[in-house]
Image: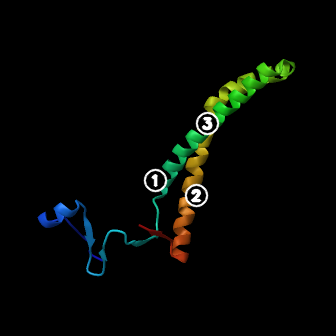
Amino acid sequence: MKLVLSTPTSREEGERNSFKLYSPNLLMEEGESQEVVVKKVGVLSVAIFSAIVGFFIGLVSGIFLVAIFSFANSAFPIITPYVDDYSSLINYSLIIFPLSYLILGFAFGAILAFAYNLLARIFGGIKLYS
């Protein structure tokens, strides 16, 4: 299907400044929707996106863990000897959590994108409407 993007003429510019999508089989006006089927996704791009999202989730999780243990240590002094045993691990959670979530996000993003590409061949992909 050949798509042609036309710019508004001088008559149309006064009414509204927009673009219309023309093709031999389709004339898409404002307010109408177009159906697109996603049959394949980029494995590396999905993996990188998942890694970035995983990094930020790990960062938030690490900050939350440090905040909870700091609060528990100051609010309940009786548990201080038990919390002190894990204090070095808790402090490193700001490094360990984001890195582990980044690595796991990349790996699972790549696996899921690869699985989607295989299943989309069989079932036809996901329909998106614009």
The residues tagged by marks 3 and 2 sit, at their Cα atoms, a distance apart of: 24 Å
Of marks 1 and 3, the one in the foreground: 3
In front of the other: 59 or 31: 31
Looking at this view, name the residue that lies furthest to the left. Answer: 10
The amino acid pointed to by label 3 is Val
The kind of residue on which mark 2 rests is Ile
Mark in front: 3 vs 2: 3
Left or right: 37 with respect to 63? left
Q: Nearer the viewer, mark 1 or mark 2?
A: 1
Q: Position of residue 67 (x, y in %)?
A: 69, 27
Whole-percent x, y for residue 42 in the image: 45, 59
CB under 8 Å between discs 3 and 2: no
Question: Is 34 situated left or right of 25 in this image?
Answer: right
Front residue of this view, candidates 29 and 6: 29
Residue beneath disc 3: 60
Mark 3, secondary structure of its residue: helix
Query: Which quadrant is home to the N terminus?
Result: bottom left
Q: Residue at x 30, y 81 (%)?
A: 25
Q: Residues within 10 Å of mark 1 (few under 14, many from 20)?
A: some
Residue 108: x and y, percent?
60, 53
What residue would you read off at disc 2? Answer: 111
Q: Residue at x 55, y 48 (%)?
A: 106
For marks 1 and 3, give the CA distance.
Answer: 23 Å
Residue at disc 1, secondary structure: helix
| Quadrant showing the C terminus | bottom left
Residue 36 marker: none
Label at residue 45: 1
x, y percent for residue 54: 58, 44
Q: CA distance from mark 1 to mark 2?
A: 12 Å
**Residue 105 position (above or below residue 112):** above
Along the polypeptide, which appears first: circle 3 or circle 2?
A: 3
Furthest residue to the right?
A: 78
